[in-house]
Image (cartoon, rainbow, N blue to C red):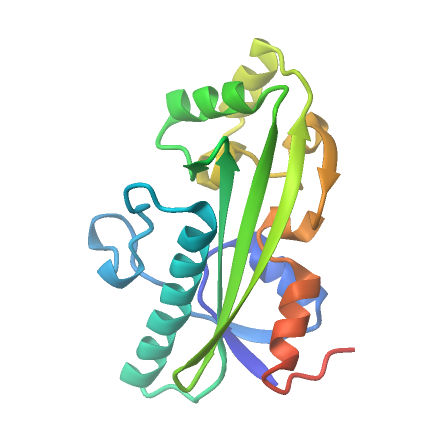
């Protein structure tokens, strides 16, 4: 069986390949021409868990609309969204270098929660799973943060870091799903796809 991946993330593509799943990628518009249906701006006071489910579901459902509009073959549409929660606050992708530096300074020596929601839409039916992991950073030196930010790695990642990259050296403790922190929890995703008849392994 084959599906559509509604995500630009190279990490998610890599993890689906790891799972042995064949897929085609659906690309949404971003920047000033971004599709309003998948606006990732948190609502005022929105709970992080509700936020990540709302965005993941919206991406899957918008992906299904694209499939219908383009008259593409009907296949499941899989999407995901990852966000960080620190002291009840949603922390998304950094806006710029200064923002990335500030985010990493806040995460230094602290425990935060990484939430990744995965949604699958098939012919208008959407199912959702959530992966929640706790990550603790060791105390970071200012020079470490500066060099990491200058590498460019933090700029397209929730919480301004990628655990599978250089920032793996920052992680003192992880409780939960390593692949969930990367952006696609393979265990939960596999169980979700089984609900739609995917046979894995």
Q: Residue at x 63, y 67 (%)?
A: 189
* Relative image position of residue 18 (x, y in whole percent): 71, 64
| Quarter of image, res 26 | bottom left
Q: Is residue 192 left or right of residue 77?
A: right
Q: Is residue 20 left or right of residue 182?
A: right
Q: Nearer the viewer, residue 147 or 46?
A: 46
Q: Residue at x 70, y 48 (%)?
A: 178
| Quarter of image, res 165 | top right
Q: Nearer the viewer, residue 31 or 102?
A: 102
* Relative image position of residue 128 (x, y in whole percent): 52, 68
Q: Tell me if residue 39 comes above or below residue 171 in the rendering.
A: below
Q: Tell me if residue 3 comes above or below residue 58 in the rendering.
A: below
Of the 4 image quadrants, the one containing the N terminus is bottom right
* Relative image position of residue 139 (x, y in whole percent): 66, 16
Q: Residue at x 65, y 39 (%)?
A: 134
Of the 4 image quadrants, the one containing the C terminus is bottom right
């Amino acid at each position: 069986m084959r599906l559509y991946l509604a995500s630009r993330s190279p990490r998610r593509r890599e993890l689906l390949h790891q799972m042995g799943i064949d897929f085609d990628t659906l690309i949404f518009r971003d920047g000033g021409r971004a599709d309003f249906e998948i606006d990732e701006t948190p609502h005022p006071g929105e709970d992080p868990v509700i936020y990540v489910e709302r965005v993941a579901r919206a991406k899957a459902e918008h992906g299904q609309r694209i499939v219908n509009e383009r008259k593409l073959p009907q296949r499941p549409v899989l999407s995901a969204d990852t966000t960080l929660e620190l002291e009840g606050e949603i922390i998304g992708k950094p806006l710029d270098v200064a923002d990335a530096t500030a985010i990493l300074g806040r995460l230094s020596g602290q425990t935060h929660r990484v939430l990744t929601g995965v949604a699958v839409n098939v012919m208008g039916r959407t199912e959702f799973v959530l992966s929640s992991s706790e990550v603790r950073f060791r105390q970071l030196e200012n020079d470490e943060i500066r060099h990491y930010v200058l590498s460019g790695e933090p700029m397209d990642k929730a919480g301004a870091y990628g655990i599978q990259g250089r920032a793996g050296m920052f992680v003192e403790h992880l409780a939960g799903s390593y692949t969930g922190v990367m952006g696609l929890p393979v265990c939960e995703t596999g169980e979700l796809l089984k609900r739609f008849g995917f046979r894995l392994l």
